[in-house]
Every structure is written in C-alpha cells, then in structure tokens.
Amino acid sequence: MHDASLKKFAFNNLAESLYPSMIDIIDHITNTGKVSDSTVSKLKLVLVEMLTNSLKHSGGGETIIEVAVTGAQIAIKKIDTGNGLTISSNQNLMVWPLPGKHHGNKVITVYTDASAILNARLTNNCRLQFFIEEVTETGPLDINTLTEHFGLMIITRACDTFTYEFDIDTCTNNFTAIINKM
C-alpha cells in the first residue's frame, strides 16, 4: 500500500487512555479526507478491540498504532511486544511463532458462535489471515458462551482484510486491519 498519509500513535496501555486514543486516531483519519459514517463505525470497532487487546495482552510498555491512509484504503496496524498469539484449535494449543515451516495454507478454526465461524489461513509459521465462514442456521448469540477470541471475530467482520504476524526479528506482534473506504 502506498502511504499517502502515515502516522504512528503511542498507546500507554491504560484503561483511561483507550477512549481518548481511539478519538485521536479517528480524528486523524477523518482529517486526511472524506470518510463515510459507515467506515468511521468500522474504524471504531476495530480500534476499540485492538486497544482492549493491548490492555489485556501487551505485556506492559507501549503499544504502537500505525495508521496509513490512501485514497482507497485505511490500514491500522497494532504493534506490541506482549506474548505471541495463542489459539486453541481442535484441542491443539498453537502459540506464535509456530515451530517449523510446514504450515503454509493450513486453515484453522479460531472461534465459533451461532452466526459464523472465524477461521484463519496460515501463510507460514509467523503469519495468518483471518476470514469468516457464515453459518446458514443461526440461533441466538449466548453472551455467556463468548470466548477469548470474540474480539478477533468483531475485527474480522468490520474490515476487508485482517492479519496477524509475529515478527521474529523484533519479537513483536503485528495485527493489521485494512478497511476499504466507501
């Protein structure tokens, strides 16, 4: 993505900073050009989930939020030094980076609820891309059965592309959400 506008925001991982940080980032994005109300709503969902994830899992210190805005897309990247992503899929615990190099194109189930299945395609032992598989017979969503990865479902639904990558060189977690402008 060609960066017409790239800005980094530092989030101090304090609960009282979550809302002001989200507002600062949204203001920056809307000041870079026309963004529809629908896109702003999606951005808010993505940012609240990413920042909440930082509060829970970042391991202290700061989290960096990089925002790149082009004519057609908005990319939000959350970078932290907390523990790698952990997913329990089919009773297997997967912790990034995964050992070995045999994971390309493998699909895992991350989360399931009454409306959809959140899957991820492994690109390699450090990277995966989330995607939704809709469930045809939906029932009511039981709030008591929500698991740890419900936030990943929210982000995946809100954006056009959502990826995770563990950067071995910097030992950082990188979550990237791309939203096409409308």
Image (cartoon, helix red, strand yellow):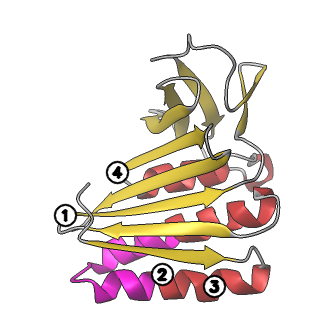
- Dot 4 amino acid type: Asp
Q: Position of residue 108 (x, y in %)?
A: 58, 23
Disc marking residue 72: 1
User: Can residue 64 be seen in the rendering of this structure?
Assistant: yes
Q: Specify the farthest residue to the left.
A: 71
- Dot 2 amino acid type: Ile
Residue under the point 80% across and 52% down: 144
Image quarter where the C terminus lies is bottom left
In the rendered structure, the answer to whether residue 129 lies left or right of residue 150 reads left
**Mark 1 vs mark 2, CA separation in Å:** 18 Å
Mark 3: secondary structure: helix
Disc marking residue 25: 2
Residue hosting label 3: 19
Mark toward the viewer: 4 or 1: 1
In the rendered structure, the answer to whether residue 177 lies left or right of residue 179 reads right
Q: Specify the farthest residue to the front.
A: 169
User: Can residue 114 be seen in the rendering of this structure?
Assistant: no
Q: Which residues are magenta?
A: 26-45
**Mark 4 vs mark 3, CA separation in Å:** 24 Å
Q: Residues within 10 Å of mark 3 (few under 14, many from 20)?
A: few
Mark 4: secondary structure: loop
Q: Position of residue 48 (x, y in %)?
A: 60, 71
Mark 1: secondary structure: loop
**Mark 4 vs mark 2, CA separation in Å:** 19 Å
Between discs 1 and 2, the one toward the N terminus: 2
**Mark 3 vs mark 1, CA separation in Å:** 26 Å
Disc marking residue 160: 4
Q: How many marks?
A: 4
Q: Is residue 56 above or below residue 103?
A: below
- Dot 3 amino acid type: Tyr
Q: Are marks 3 and 2 in contact (CB under 8 Å)?
A: no
